[in-house]
Amino acid sequence: MIAPDAAADLRAERRFDLLAAVLIGAIAILAAVLAVIQIETGQASSRAQVEAARLTADLSARLEVSSTVQNQAFVDEQEALALSIQATGRQIAGLQYGDDGAIAVGQVEHQAGADLGTALTATSATSGGAPLDSYTSGLLEATTQQLLGELREQNRQVDLANDAGARNSKSILGLSFLALAGVLTGLAAVLREGRAGWIALLTAVAMAGAAGLLAVLAVI
């Protein structure tokens, strides 16, 4: 017959061993789950960061090219307008002084200004066409609406990268808690079911619980 004190000690030892065994299994499962989450979120963050960087570079190129094209078109229009103004001034001067030659030159210059304006308009209308490749054509033909849409997508990718990065940090913290839980479980196994052993084991349970909570937060 087993003495009551010995039976109580045996039951306590069995509870301790059972809890330690369950905890070791839980740590192993949580470690696998958190490792998968950490890999997935790390890859997602990297993909989003690369895409955001690509969109940033593309936006910069589109803005630079479209601004250059628009500025050049404005300069060309100014030149055509200046030629027409010069022609008008020459005609007025010719009328004032009765200089038919100046009037004729002014008429020719005015027509040249009109022809230049027509040619520039036609050139602008065909900008981005053959023989340019599709990417260069896209740079030249970028509209404000397209730029705004690309900017929204770039911001969305940044948000995705930040979200994935935050979840990745949670998974890494969870793995750190699991590592600590594993160390405490090993310490508890050495100390056995005494006061110090139970403190170490229960602390390991708390660490594992915190890691499980972080795993849930990293998923949602």
Image (tube, rainbow, N blue to C red):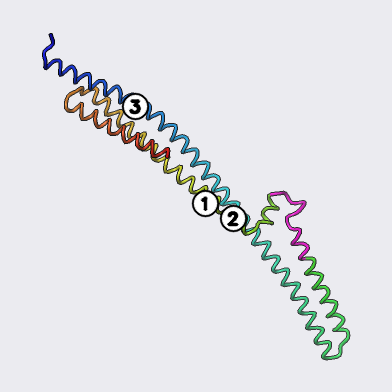
The quarter holding residue 211 reads top left
The quarter holding residue 95 reads bottom right
Relative side of 179 to 127, left or right? left
Give coordinates of residue 156: x percent, y percent. Answer: 52, 49
- Give neighbour class at mark 1: few <14, some 14-19, many 20+ (Cα, 10 Å): some
Q: Amino acid at mark 2?
A: Ser
Q: Secondary structure at mark 1?
A: helix
- Above or below — where is 207 with respect to 17? below
Q: Secondary structure at mark 2?
A: helix
| Residue at image mark 3 | 26
Badge 1 or badge 2: first in the primary sequence: 2
Please report the residue visible at 71 percent of the width from the left and 65 percent of the height from the top: 73
Q: Secondary structure at mark 3?
A: helix
Query: Which range is magenta?
Result: 120-134
| Residue at image mark 2 | 60
State the quadrant of the C terminus. Answer: top left
| Residue at image mark 1 | 155
Give coordinates of residue 182: x percent, y percent. Answer: 31, 28
